[in-house]
Image (cartoon, grey):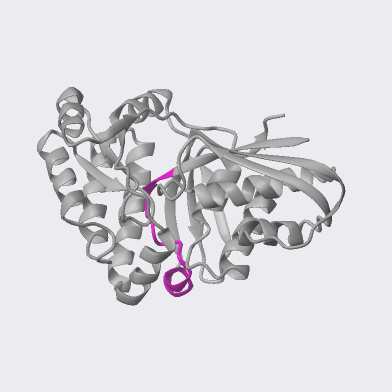
Amino acid sequence: MVITKTPHRITLGGGGTDITWYSQKRGGAWISAAIDQYVYLKVKPLPNKNITDVSNQIIRECLKLTKTTHGVEIISTSDIPGKSGLGGSGAFTVGLLHALYKHQGINKSKENLAKEAYFIERIKLQKPIGPQDQYITALGSLRYFEMDKKGNVQHEPLELMATTIFRLKNNLLFFSTGVQRDASLVLSDVKKSAETQALDKIKEIGKMAKTYLLKNKLNDFGKTFHEHWLIKRKLSDKVTNSYFDEIYDEAMRSGALGGKIMGAGGGGWFVFYIDKNKSRLRNKMRKMRLKEHKFGFDWEGTRLAI
């Protein structure tokens, strides 16, 4: 039996510039962080059974790619509900590939697990996504990524001061909306309506965010969330709605320097950057029936739990 543990993720800058239609034109750049909320995949052999029909598309393609032909039991659990905007699908695919390979005694690098997971979701299943989720959930840590027009991905861990990491963890507040959404639907709509110039600006904001993090200018970093929000909410009608706009506006009035909806938008989780008066923001969100969750960072990426 093999059990893998793969983190969810948050985006700290440049989100959306990894999607194929844009990155093939202009190249993408973004910052992602793995968080200490996990997807667990258990793979256990089933005696005297062969694989026949598999209805789940991701599981089917993972079995094919890993050349798993004998019967296996696959059980998945997650610390966070699906379709929350925190990279759960990418974490699931990475974790399942990792578990299936380990089950066969095959060691794959985290980089290769990320590439293969992206291949399954983007090429085999034709999801309108970029490789952000697969790479950060496989690799872990806080990382800056660049993707060229040919689809090659380069990345580096952000070497942040301990005080920066401490402040960042304490000043990012996460709230669940209770809404689930399919990122592919939002991304498909963005593809139809987005202007390249808007994503150019989002990419530049992401690069500014990287600079501010490295220089420990966290309030300036927090303000990039607001700049990103103002642009992103115009990219698709599915990114936000009047209820989410009200949440965001109340958070800003309560002292947040900026915020965003995790993932492609459309629901799931809000994250706000706030340096002072956190209790005021927490009380306001509580009154609006949002639930706060405390996250830390994950520094390892996908690994064996057993």
Residue range of the region highlighted in magenta in the rendering: 10-26
Report the number of discs: 0
Asked if residue 212 can be seen in this view, the reply is: yes
Query: Left or right of 273: which side holds 188?
Result: right
Query: Left or right of 274: which side holds 40?
Result: right
Asked if residue 108 can be seen in this view, the reply is: no
Residue 285 % position (x, y): 19, 34
- The quarter of the picture where residue 220 lies is top left
The answer to whether residue 293 is above or below residue 149 is above
Q: Is residue 213 magenta?
A: no
Q: Residue at x 65, y 42 (%)?
A: 75
Q: Residue at x 33, y 32 (%)?
A: 216
Residue 29 % position (x, y): 43, 57
The answer to whether residue 163 is above or below residue 6 is above
Residue furthest toward the right? 48
The answer to whether residue 59 is above or below residue 218 is below
The answer to whether residue 191 is above or below residue 211 is below
Residue 147 % position (x, y): 51, 61
**Quadrant into which the N terminus falls:** top right
Query: Left or right of 126: which side holds 258?
Result: left
- The quarter of the picture where residue 199 lies is bottom left
Q: Which residue is drawn at 52% across and 32% down?
A: 298
- The quarter of the picture where residue 293 lies is top left
Q: Is 220 in front, or is 198? A: 198
Residue furthest toward the left? 253
Q: Is 23 in front, or is 55? A: 55
Query: Left or right of 230: which side holds 62?
Result: right
Q: Residue at x 41, y 30 (%)?
A: 295
Residue 208 % position (x, y): 32, 49
**Quadrant into which the C terminus falls:** top right
